[in-house]
Image: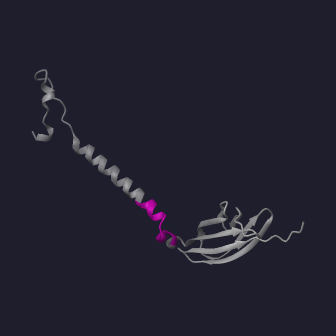
Amino acid sequence: MPLVDSPELEDYKNGIPEEKPEPRNWCSTIRLLIGILVVVIIILSAINYAQSHHFALATGRGTITGQIIDSAGDGIPGEIVVFGTSVKSIADENGYFALSNVPQGSRTLFVGYQGQAIEYTINLAAGDTLDVGVIRLVTTLMP
């Protein structure tokens, strides 16, 4: 009998039992744990790749960043929409925004806040992060 399949001393604490205890099978437990570990590593690798620059290149997508300000130069939480896609975002309280997963090519951004809106045309390459800088929303309304 191999040493791995040998009973332990505790199995014979009360004398020799009528039946032999079943051998402990650690090999199957270790194989199961290794299999689970391999699956977790594969999943984490796929998630990491999906967030990488290479994935953006492969899918033809990029990122647009910038800031929206009003006529006084203060940041405003305007809404940004990429025309012809489902990509949109709202800038933070200081006017900064980031649009990710924007399809490459010539795109039109609609930037709006409290009834004011402008169009802004950009050209985005796959995998790039394009900073459009400061977008100023100026009202033409007179009180």
- Quarter of the image with the N terminus is top left
Spot occupied by residue 84 in the image (x, y as percentages of width and height) = 69, 69
Q: Is residue 48 magenta?
A: yes
108 versus 36 height, above or below: below
112 versus 130 height, above or below: above
- The quarter of the displayed image where residue 119 is located: bottom right
- Report whether 12 appears left or right of 70: left
Farthest top residue in view: 14
Residue positioned 15% across, 27% down in the render: 11
- Report whether 53 appears left or right of 21: right
- The quarter of the displayed image where residue 89 is located: bottom right
- Report whether 64 appears left or right of 5: right
Spot occupied by residue 137 in the image (x, y as percentages of width and height) = 76, 70
Q: Nearer the viewer, residue 89 or 46?
A: 89
Q: Nearer the viewer, residue 73 or 113?
A: 73
Residue positioned 59% across, 75% down in the render: 130
The magenta stretch is: 45-56
